[in-house]
Image (tube, rainbow, N blue to C red):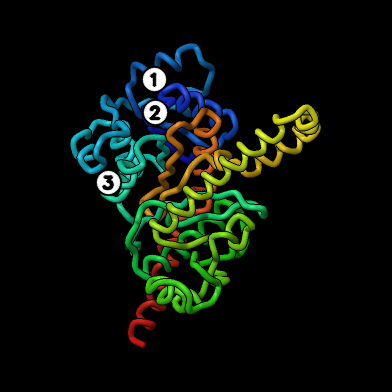
């Protein structure tokens, strides 16, 4: 069984949506056993009368909750019996293979680094997000964990992201692009100019060169590598543009009688298109390079999104992604040492 812990108290719709998502995941997969971490009395009250396999779902009590407004470092240090901290400790001790939370992103990033800890050889643990594209999806890594990064960090992000997309998302030899302001090798700031030649020399990944932000929605790469400042700007612009376009389409269709008729005719195709570009179908953003998988689900996730976050953890554990990351990081260390000597 793949053991997955869930922060039952994290998020806007907690604990009901998190618990419902857990029950849906149990119905959909026989490979998992789940641990709901949070206020035991409240969780059991919601579970009361529900039908599920009792031997595959356990509840661990945690009396505190880290709120969105809490200072991340202080919250992790002071709220030691919070659902987020208790759940992360299960990851550290090996009692869980993955941990899912819709709670505070900042606290989750801090707890991941401090409590779960990084894998051997991993310098920085990046946060990735799966963005929908015309060709499927791309992993934007890092999108929020490491604002300042060195070339070696970006190399590790490329390796980690490539392994994730191949083993979890099933993409053979995923294309890796370096997020930049132009496709030419000499373009960019000092970080990207120093990283580019190292990625070219790196064996084991399918590096395709620079990836401009405007080409990401078209599916230019399966993995888009950057430091978190650029990554978060890309992510927020992506989300904002999608929301604005959707609003304009709705307004246009409602603006006239003919528009409303046309809207009814294209409604099935439009719903299919919107589902393709709905990032919530992926469930959440994985924080990679830790001792176990951490998935940050959106704060307002519903039960279906929580279920998807849980299910995406299966491939990660089944394919021993962390073991492959450790081996790959050890191998790439030689590339960095050789380049530094040169």
When the figure is inspected, residue 93 is found, relative to residue 228, above or below; the finding is: above
Whole-percent x, y for residue 211 in the image? 55, 66
Q: CA distance from mark 3 to mark 2?
A: 19 Å
Cβ atoms at labels 1 and 3 below 8 Å apart: no
Nearer to me, 149 or 341 = 149
**Disc number at residue 71?**
none
Q: CA distance from mark 1 to mark 3?
A: 25 Å
User: Residue 85 occupies which quadrant of the picture?
Assistant: top left
Nearer to me, 272 or 307 = 272
- Residue at image x 57%, y 34%? 30
Q: Residues within 10 Å of mark 2 (few under 14, many from 20)?
A: many
Disc on the earlier residue, 3 or 2: 2
* Residue at numbered disc 1: 43
Whole-percent x, y for residue 322 in the image? 43, 56
Instruction: Tell me: 221 left or right of 48.
Output: right
Q: CA distance from mark 1 to mark 2?
A: 8 Å
- Residue at image x 46%, y 31%? 300
Q: Secondary structure at mark 2?
A: loop
Whole-percent x, y for residue 246 in the image? 62, 39
Residue situated furthest top in the rendering: 49
Instruction: Tell me: 245 left or right of 141.
Output: right
- Residue at image x 47%, y 33%? 33
- Residue at image x 43%, y 52%? 232
* Residue at numbered disc 3: 115
Cβ atoms at labels 1 and 2 below 8 Å apart: yes
Q: Secondary structure at mark 3?
A: helix
Nearer to me, 295 or 239 = 239
Residue situated furthest front in the rendering: 256
* Residue at numbered disc 2: 8
């Amino acid at each position: 069984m793949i053991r997955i812990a869930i922060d039952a108290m994290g998020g806007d719709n907690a604990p009901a949506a998190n618990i419902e998502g857990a029950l849906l995941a149990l119905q959909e997969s026989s490979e998992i056993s789940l641990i709901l971490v949070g206020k035991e009395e409240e969780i059991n009250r919601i579970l009361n009368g529900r039908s599920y396999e009792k031997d595959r779902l356990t509840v661990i009590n945690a009396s505190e909750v880290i709120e969105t407004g809490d200072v991340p470092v202080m919250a992790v240090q002071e709220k030691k019996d919070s659902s987020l901290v208790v759940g992360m400790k299960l990851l550290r001790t090996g009692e869980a293979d993955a941990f899912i939370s819709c709670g505070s992103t900042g606290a989750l990033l801090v707890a991941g680094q401090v409590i779960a800890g990084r894998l051997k050889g991993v310098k920085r643990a990046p946060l990735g997000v799966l963005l929908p594209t015309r060709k499927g999806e791309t992993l934007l890594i890092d999108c929020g964990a490491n604002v300042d990064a060195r070339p070696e960090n970006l190399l590790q992000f490329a390796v980690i992201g490539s392994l994730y997309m191949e083993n979890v998302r099933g993409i053979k030899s995923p294309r890796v692009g370096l997020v930049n302001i132009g496709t030419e090798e000499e373009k960019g700031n000092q970080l990207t100019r120093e990283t580019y030649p190292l990625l070219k020399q790196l064996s084991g990944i399918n590096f395709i060169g620079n990836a401009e932000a405007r080409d990401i929605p078209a599916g230019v790469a399966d993995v888009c590598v950057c430091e978190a400042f650029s990554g978060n700007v890309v992510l927020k612009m992506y989300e904002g543009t999608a929301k604005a376009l959707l609003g304009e389409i709705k307004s246009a269709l409602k603006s006239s009688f003919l528009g409303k008729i046309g809207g009814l005719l294209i409604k099935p195709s439009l719903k299919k298109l919107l589902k393709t570009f709905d990032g919530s179908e992926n469930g959440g953003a994985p924080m990679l390079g830790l001792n176990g998988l951490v998935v940050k689900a959106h704060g307002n996730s519903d039960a279906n999104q929580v279920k998807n976050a849980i299910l995406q953890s299966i491939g990660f554990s089944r394919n021993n992604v962390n073991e492959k990351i450790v081996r790959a990081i050890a191998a790439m260390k030689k590339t960095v040492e050789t380049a530094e000597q040169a």
